[in-house]
Image (cartoon, helix red, strand yellow):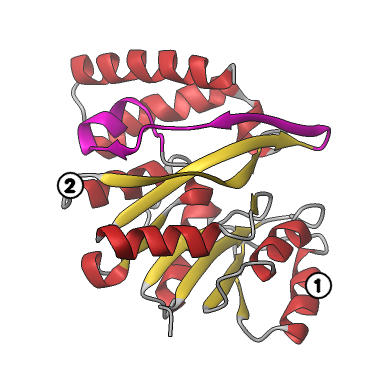
Amino acid sequence: MKPLVSIIMPSYNSEKTISQSIDSVLSQNYENWELLITDDNSNDKTISIVNTYIEKDKRIRLFINAKNLGAGGSRNRSIKEAKGKYIAFLDSDDIWFSNKLDAQIEHMLRHNVALSYSWYQKFTELGDGGFVKPELTVTYQQLLYSNVIGCLTAIYDTEKLGKRYMPLIRKRQDMGLWLDILKDIDEAVAVPQVLAKYRVDSGMTQNKFKVLKWQWLFYRDVVGLNLLQAIKCFGIYSYKGFLKSRI
């Protein structure tokens, strides 16, 4: 039997998009998965929508936060409950292609990879955008300058790494997790295929100034860079982010 994949999905007031995200999991050619959704105290119809899916497919489980913890805290709760060899991530407004797990798990097994990611495509309600095709490998130092690992594409192996959790910060939790893992391995490896679609017309993606603010605080408070190191990384990160935004 193929290894179990635990899919980590945080949700918060996601009634307009979560059905599309869950449907993309249900469409997977790879069938040995569990979907762990932690709702961050939504006040819309998100929980009701998720419950309709649970009635149809017992591979889906729902946890509800008593208070709002943010995406990192919500993901961590699902990771704690996960039973899979592999931990994968999908937000409640993004989409996977049906061959996503099949292609990526096969790639990880064949190449003995502990942390992998893939190419992906941007999209909005109006239609599809450009493709994001990061380099085929990334090291700790390279990731400091640009978070090329799209959270919706990332998968890590708990048998090689143990369960790894996101830092309890409101933004940039995913980058914090990748860097933590990359302290212990030489590199993360990409699957050179477009396997997911990343929504860019919702949430923090729309506010570039807030993104830069949180990135600066991340370098100083989470990574612990000194002032000169932070200025260097921030400058390179901002430039690379500008280039990426033009795709």
The residue sitting at 36% across, 52% down in the picture is 116
Q: Which x, y percent locates residue 209?
A: 55, 19
> How many marks are shown on the rendered structure?
2
Where does label 1 land, which residue?
48
Left or right: where does residue 213 sit relative to residue 156? right
**In terms of secondary structure, where does tag 1 sit?**
helix
Query: On residue 184, which mark appears?
Result: none
Q: Nearer the viewer, residue 6 or 39?
A: 6
Is the residue 168 above or below the residue 210 in the image? Answer: below
Instruction: Give amino acid for label 1.
Output: Ser
Where does label 2 land, which residue?
183
Q: Which residue lies most toward the front here? A: 110
Instruction: Give residue 218's quadrant in the image.
Output: top left
Which region shows up in magenta?
125-148
Q: Are marks 1 and 2 in contact (CB under 8 Å)?
A: no
Q: Nearer the viewer, mark 1 or mark 2?
A: 2
> Is 133 inside the magenta-drawn segment?
yes
Is the residue 245 above or below the residue 55 in the image? Answer: above
Q: Split into 4 quadrants, where in the image is the C terminus?
A: top right
Instruction: Give residue 137's quadrant in the image.
Output: top left
Left or right: where does residue 107 sit relative to residue 202? left
Q: Residues within 10 Å of mark 1 (few under 14, many from 20)?
A: few
Q: CA distance from mark 1 to mark 2?
A: 40 Å
Is the residue 36 above or below the residue 123 in the image? Answer: below
Instruction: Give amino acid for label 2.
Output: Lys
Q: Which x, y percent locates residue 168?
A: 39, 52
Left or right: where does residue 80 sit relative to residue 210? left
The residue sitting at 52% across, 27% down in the picture is 211
> Does the rendering let one see residue 167?
no
Q: Which x, y percent locates residue 187?
A: 23, 44
> Is 60 inside the magenta-drawn segment?
no
